[in-house]
Amino acid sequence: MTNIYKINDTDLEEFLAYRSTIKVILYYKQECEFCKAQIVDLNNLANTYHEGIEYALCDIARKTKFCLKNNITSIPTIQIYENNKLVKQFEAYQPYSELERAISLSY
């Protein structure tokens, strides 16, 4: 099973800079039902696509300035980074198949 890191708003830059891998970050709020479902999908992705990809969860409750700075306008939001550059962003719940397609294109 692949480890999914839990990061916070102050850890983001460090997480992105650590190792040259693809990064997948899920921004969520604990009370959000769609976020809970997306976390399950992220876990499944991490178990399937784990070589060269790192995954993180970032709880953004009460982080308005952080969200504005990072273009997070809805939850859940998933961002995919390659070489420390944002290459894809999904806003709102996405079906597993859509996330898998995006990951496999980067993979």
Image (cartoon, rainbow, N blue to C red):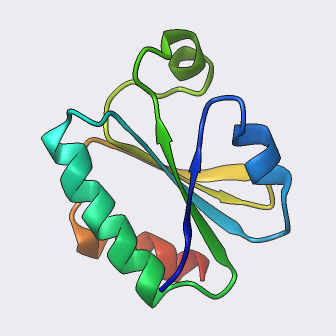
The residue shown at (75%, 71%) is 21
Q: Is residue 93 something one can see in this rendering?
A: no
In the rendering, at what x and y percent does residue 36 appear? 22, 51
Q: Is residue 54 left or right of residue 76?
A: right
Can you say whether 99 is above or below 28 in the image? below
In the rendering, at what x and y percent does residue 39 appear? 31, 58
In the rendering, at what x and y percent does residue 30 appear? 29, 37
Q: Is residue 31 something one can see in this rendering?
A: yes
Examine the image and state in which quarter residue 34 appears: top left
Examine the image and state in which quarter residue 75 appears: top left
The residue furthest left is 33
Can you say whether 47 is above or below 12 in the image? below
The residue shown at (43%, 85%) is 47
Q: Nearer the viewer, residue 43 or 20?
A: 43
Quick one: quadrant of the C terminus? bottom right
In the rendering, at what x and y percent does residue 71 appear? 53, 26
Q: Nearer the viewer, residue 35 or 104?
A: 35
